[in-house]
Image (cartoon, rainbow, N blue to C red):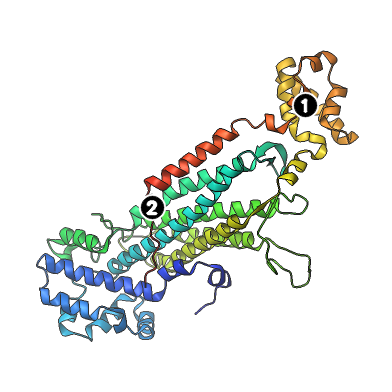
Amino acid sequence: MVFLPLVDVFGDDQLEGCFSQASLVGAWLEVERALAAAQAEHGIIPGEAVAAIDAVAVPEHIDLVRLNERTRVVGYPILPLLEQLSEQSDTAARYLHWGATTQDIMDTGLALVCACALDRIDVLARALGDGLARLAGEHRSTVMPGRTHAQPAVPITLGGKLAVFVAELTRHLERLHAARGRLAVVQLFGAAGTAAALGKQSRAVRHSVAERLGLGVVDVPWHAARDAVAEVGFVLAALAGTCGRLAREVVELSRPEIGELAEEEGYHRGASSTMPQKANPVGSETAVGMSILAGQHVGALVAALQVTHERAAGEWQAEWDAIPIAFAATAGALTAVGSVVEGLRFFPDRMRANLEREGGLIMAEAAMIAVGHVVGRGAAHALVYDASLLARTGDISLREALERTLEDDVLAALPPLDDVLDPMTYLGETDQIVTAALEGWARITTSVPAAVGTTRG
């Protein structure tokens, strides 16, 4: 087996179990058993055939080495799977896989394992969102520099920054739920999507199979229509991208010259092999790497949308690897950044000190607005721009520069400069933003049932 250093070491074992070979084969066998039971229910195959199929269609009857060898010859694993099962019972061989096609079994198996994997992603996303929501509430008034273009902009609060991530995760949770409903459905339409071989009761059988497997059901084939698969890939990549964005914030804000937060401490955590002083933000780095990996595999799923006629000729096969890696990388990103959030250390004194760097120039917009009420916005922008230049080049505070450059009558018309230049007076709707984000998270986590996140296989 290929060793994947990032996913195999830093991934989520429970998620990866959903896509183990044992899990996939188990899902295919489960679909075959459900198909037989549904067909017997509707009088298509005899009842004794179900018992025979139930007895043979179990993982212990499958030689995985032989299955892989025959799959390389056939190109797909279901015929080799059926060969091994048929050797166990003549009755099973006669009625097994009646009217179905390879992609029916594999796509329905995909629906089962993806439902398992999406449930695990849901659990990890909720844990991250809960952690961020808690921190956003705790730090709704912890003032810090807001930055645009990587430069100081205006004051914000740590809670307000984290609230944006909470709202983003709220939308992701909605997307996960919707995408799960579109992908976790039975595929049972036969060779070219007409269900002709399944007989006149094909629709009833399909609905019965769905009920037995706990999946949704659709009445239009999706052998060639892979949009639900691509949609899940996009949702995973977007979720992983949010993890990467959060991790990059930690990387940047933990730089010693900024020093506003840091990952948890630990002996040799983030240590260098040659620089003894190093404490690298390794949890965040892992999340960034995983997020990149998840995003890159969406391209394969989008390319796989371009199926011609009624069945793919290679596009479908690209999904076989792209889907598990996208899931594994997303779970890894969630696990890594979730651990980072749980252990984050914050340094409010350093945040406040950074607000006062450059003589408090971060309050220039607040000064412009105050002056604008006296002379108009355009004139105020020019006046405060000149004062900011003087503060920067003259190595003086913004307050002193304003006092030097503004006319006495303008200064007299302003509120006290201590109030104008106090970061705590220029936070706008921050408190309401935090409240809105927390309320939105509470709504989605109560309205969408939490997944169990169990492992197949």
For marks 2 and 1, give the CA distance.
52 Å
Q: Quadrant of residue 6?
A: bottom right
Circle 2 is placed at which residue position? 179
Vertical placement of residue 405 versus 89, above or below = above
Disc 2 residue type (three-letter): Ala
Disc 1 residue type (three-letter): Asp
Regarding residue 200, the answer to whether it shows in the image is yes
Q: Position of residue 259 (x, y in %)?
A: 74, 51
Q: Furthest-top residue in view?
A: 409
Left or right for 401, reference 37: right
Vertical placement of residue 62 versus 354, above or below = below
Circle 1 is placed at which residue position? 418
Left or right for 235, reference 77: right
Along the viewing direction, whichever of 341 and 107 lies nearer the viewer:
341
Q: Quadrant of residue 148?
A: top right
Residue 452 is marked as none
Along the viewing direction, whichever of 198 and 356 lies nearer the viewer:
356
The residue lying at 39 percent from left, 85 percent from top is: 65
Which quadrant is the C terminus positioned in? bottom left
Q: Position of residue 440 (x, y in %)?
A: 46, 41
Mark 1: secondary structure? helix
Along the viewing direction, whichever of 379 and 450 lies nearer the viewer:
450
Q: Earlier in the sequence, mark 2 or mark 1?
A: 2
Mark 2: secondary structure? helix
Along the viewing direction, whichever of 353 and 70 lies nearer the viewer:
353
Vertical placement of residue 183 versus 436, above or below = below
Q: Furthest-right residue in view?
A: 394
